[in-house]
Image (cartoon, rainbow, N blue to C red):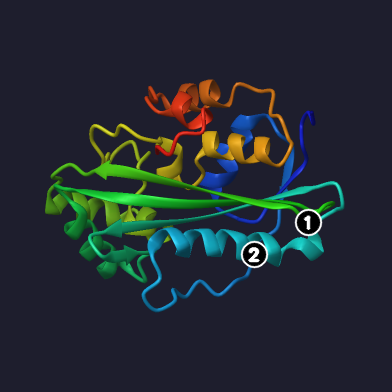
Amino acid sequence: MVEGAFILLASNSPRRKELLALGDLTFNVCVADVDESRHAGEPPAHYVLRLAEAKARAVVANALSGQFILAADTIVVDGNDLLGKPKNAAEAVQMLKRLRGHGHRVYTGLAVLDVRTGQLVKDLCVTAVPMRNYGDAEIDTYVRSGDPLDKAGAYAVQHAQFRPVENLGGCFASVMGLPLCHMVRVFQKIGVSISSDVPGNCQAYLNYECLVSSAILRGEQVG
């Protein structure tokens, strides 16, 4: 059992840093520079898991021998299309109009690499996300705030004013970019037990009653 495992987070995402802090684990950050191009015909699950692994391996040279590298990749999937971060405000508007009033899925791939042993474990969270039927004026106000420009799918599920999502039943943290219960079970598979109440901390911080955390920690393929 390892208490307070020291993590190297291969991401500079403010959301991932914010969520990881809920695990009461000490960590530092090293941004992974990888080619995020999708391979022709690559399924969403394979894509996010491949990138999560690539990010973890990309920062090994910056890690200490006792560290665990944590990496993640998140993509919005609408129909057969993968939606990344919008290139500009116009594309953000286009994405938000496309997503409103119906459901899509958010895929987040996780990878944890034990620097000492070289063992790498991956996991996948797929969350169904129902979007409310917000209006054009709401989209314009939200896009002008600048918030959508660094978000896959051009929205933040946690945005207090825009509130794009309604009746979410899956992992809130995964839609933000780091599914914490999946992270806990990945660490368990690699031999690390996290002693803090991650599900409780997550739900209290996000003010969200999670219906899937217990099932995830039991190893079920839910998100």
Q: CA distance from mark 2 to mark 1?
A: 18 Å
Is 7 on the left-hand or right-hand side of 97?
right
State the SS at label 1: loop
Q: Amino acid at mark 2?
A: Ala
Could you say which quadrant of the image residue 11 lies in? Answer: bottom right
Quick one: label 2, few (<14), some, or many (20+) residues within 10 Å? Answer: some
- In this view, the residue farthest toward the bottom is 40
Q: Residue at x 16, y 48 (%)?
A: 102
- Residue topped by disc 2: 32
Of the 4 image quadrants, the one containing the N terminus is: top right
Is 179 on the left-hand or right-hand side of 211?
right
Q: Residue at x 50, y 71 (%)?
A: 36
Of the 4 image quadrants, the one containing the C terminus is: top left
Is 23 on the left-hand or right-hand side of 105?
right
- Looking at the image, tell me whether mark 2 or mark 1 is earlier in sequence order: 2
Q: Residue at x 61, y 61 (%)?
A: 53
Is 191 on the left-hand or right-hand side of 126?
right
Could you say which quadrant of the image residue 12 lies in? Answer: bottom right
Q: Tell which tag, 2 or 1, sits nearer the viewer.
A: 1
Quick check: 199 above or below 158?
Answer: above
Q: Is 170 in front, or is 216?
A: 216
Q: Residue at x 59, y 31 (%)?
A: 22
State the SS at label 2: loop
Q: Amino acid at mark 1?
A: Gly
Quick check: 10 above or below 27?
Answer: below
Q: Are marks 2 and 1 in contact (CB under 8 Å)?
A: no
- On residue 118, the disc is 1
Q: Is 160 in front, or is 31?
A: 31
Q: Position of residue 137 (x, y in %)?
A: 14, 51
Quick check: 87 above or below 11?
Answer: below
